Image (cartoon, helix red, strand yellow):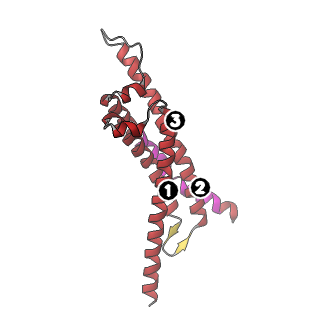
Amino acid sequence: MEGLLGGLIDIGIGILQLILGVALALFSITIALNVLDRTTKGLNEFEELRKKNLAVAVYIAGVLIAVGNVVGQAVSGISKAVVPGGFNLAALIGGLIQLFIGLPLAIAIIVWAQSRVYSWLVKAAEKLPGVEIKEFDLVKDLREGNIATAVVLFGTFFAISLIASQGVAYLSEPIASAILRLIS
């Protein structure tokens, strides 16, 4: 009977971890989409999606994947706090700190990468013979369906998020260790 009860508790903990992970993912994606909306003023992303604008879809997918890569590591830190056989408050606090470092980091790298890559594209294009660029506008390019621009940004967001996620991956452990040392 004790084994059955322990098994049911472990299943309950697993379900709790899943619910927590999904809730944090939805929270993170909502924040990321709000920031995205502010960085692309003048572009109604959802209206463009209704018009089947593939460039906007690729761009949004890049943002969501980048946020997911970084925040996913933070969510794993929180999940370590609720494990079968025990609850670790220090690990939970460390995981939450990891999340609140990871989410702003993900958003910051997306905004930074977007401006740097676009600036680089303008400079590179200006050096091509016979190419004169008077205006290079991300919102205009996306609205006009420039898939090349969207794919370059998608790749940039994805690559940078893979690297940043590894930096965030193990933050909860030293934070939890420090918290335990402070309270003991």
Q: Residue furthest right?
A: 183
Q: Main secondary structure of the magenta part?
A: helix
Residue 108 at x, y percent in the picture: 52, 38
Q: Earlier in the sequence, mark 3 or mark 1?
A: 1
Q: Is residue 151 magenta?
A: no
At numbered mark 3, what does the secondary structure look like: helix, strand or loop? helix
Q: Amino acid at mark 2?
A: Ile
Q: Residue at x 60, y 66 (%)?
A: 89
Q: Is residue 178 magenta?
A: yes
Residues at marks 3 and 1, CA–CA distance in whole angstroms: 21 Å
Q: Nearer the viewer, mark 3 or mark 1?
A: 3
Say if mark 2 contacts mark 1, CB within 8 Å: no
Residue 29 at x, y percent in the picture: 46, 48
Q: Earlier in the sequence, mark 2 or mark 3?
A: 3
At numbered mark 2, what does the secondary structure look like: helix, strand or loop? helix
Which residue position is annotated with label 3? 38
Which residue position is annotated with label 2? 175
Which residue position is annotated with label 1? 24
* Region of the chain picked out in magenta, as a range: 160-180
Q: Is residue 174 above or below residue 121?
A: below
Answer with the quarter of the image where residue 54 lies: top left
Q: Residue at x 56, y 71 (%)?
A: 87
Which part of the image, by quadrant, shows the C terminus?
A: bottom right
Badge 1: few (under 14), some or many (20 or more) residues near its Cα, within 10 Å?
some
